[in-house]
Image (cartoon, rainbow, N blue to C red):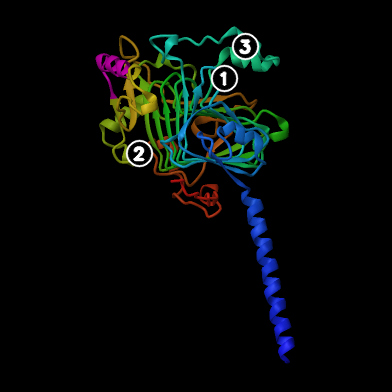
Amino acid sequence: MSGNRKLLLLLTVFLTGIAVYGTKVHAEEKASGKIYTVKQDGTGDFDTIQAGVDSVPTGSTLWIYEGVYNENVCIKDKTINLYGVNRDACILQSANDYYHSIPLTIGAGSVENLTLYGYTDKQLGDNWIFRPYCADEAYINSFYDDYARSIATEYEGYTVHIDQDYLAGKQLRFRNCLILSENNYCVGSGLRRDCSLLFERCEFRAYAKGGNVLLHDGANPDYYGECFVGFKDCTFYNYTGIYFFAVRSIKDENKINLSFQNNKVYTVGYTDNDTYPENRYSGGTLDTMQRLSTENRLMGSGFSAGAQISFFTPHETMQFMEALLACSPSSYIAPEVPEGILVLWASDALSTAPGSFPIWVENFDEQQREDGWCGSSCFYLTPDSSGNTLAQMNNSSQPPVMPESSPLQSARQPVYRPLRQR
């Protein structure tokens, strides 16, 4: 082969390689989207999170720098990634006294390294934890939709609300986030077909009437189907709400695969069975849990080491509530709660009826078959659920196996780590 032909061949291979490499890079850039910075001092691309959300195209990432962002961030019909440079220093907060006014509404993407804080106006009453809900009339009348008005009338807001048709067929992941609420649940989510909702290394803290997580399936026939919700290496702190976890089954056509892995629970129960509304939960009740604790059989029943049932006297309960009212949630200061269930005294005399467990199950579907998780109709515990504080979150029927295809393993990690300005 002549020197010219060899040179031409090498040049052809080289140019082909460049073309292939360029195509690959372009595909990766298109998949990851562009990255923008949010800095309150004005040196970034945006100085508020919502301004970034409104301006960037779907698939983009907002890298959020230190600061307390007092905003009601709403992301609809877009896939946006929100990454904080430091969880404790990047705080998105707002009052969540009202259902439609909360820190974060989102449908798809990733949220990482952020503190999300829904607080209440402490001036509304000395007992801010159990004060009656009373929505402002002007706020209620600001909605022209009858359903939106009725919701605004009856319910306080979550800290994070996930209930959009845009979620169908997409993934939403929270990783290394602190989610606090002084009103309704920390997270409230309505699910859609083929979606994946993932929480990894997140900490939930509920200080008032709501608990940590509320999930329900979809009611729109266009989005019936199967989906996945996973919690891995998370910690749940529920100080007063009677249910730390709630599920609502709406339609028979839906199926939610629910996975719990290595989660720790610190929640409350009450001695008075009358404290609880009708609860279709069919698992172990507090009297059963107390026997397991007394007989040192918790670990054998699926509890993690150290988990127990603790009971407070009326005086201890009063001290606990006083300390809670005086605490500073945003500083993560709160009365210590032992792992497992802390049973608070809720009446003058201990009820002789079995206590209720702090999981709430509601079935609105037509069949009400109650063959799912804790007696629900469309939530089903996955085989890989294991290593959790509460036995009800562990699947003891099969060995704990994490399939390679599990969304908890396949969730894409963020690849961008910008250098901080000096």
Q: Is residue 54 above or below residue 242?
A: below
Closer to the camera in the image, 130 or 298: 130
Q: Residues within 10 Å of mark 2 (few under 14, many from 20)?
A: many
Counting from the top left corner in percent of width and height, residue 292 is at: 31, 32
Circle 2 sits on which residue?
A: 303
The residue at the point 55 percent across, 40 percent down is: 44
Q: Earlier in the sequence, mark 2 or mark 1?
A: 1
Q: Which residue type carries mark 3? A: Ile
Q: In front of the other: label 2 or label 1?
A: 1
Q: CA distance from mark 1 to mark 3?
A: 10 Å
Q: Would residue 41 appear left or right of 193 to someone viewing this image? A: left
Q: Which residue type carries mark 1? A: Tyr
Specify the principal SS of the magenta part: helix
Closer to the camera in the image, 276 or 138: 138
Q: Quadrant of the N terminus?
A: bottom right
Closer to the camera in the image, 408 or 76: 76
The residue at the point 61 percent across, 23 percent down is: 364
The residue at the point 72 percent across, 77 percent down is: 12
The residue at the point 72 percent across, 82 percent down is: 9
Q: In front of the other: label 2 or label 3?
A: 3
Q: Is residue 399 magenta?
A: no
Region rendered in magenta:
311-323
Q: Quadrant of residue 368?
A: top right
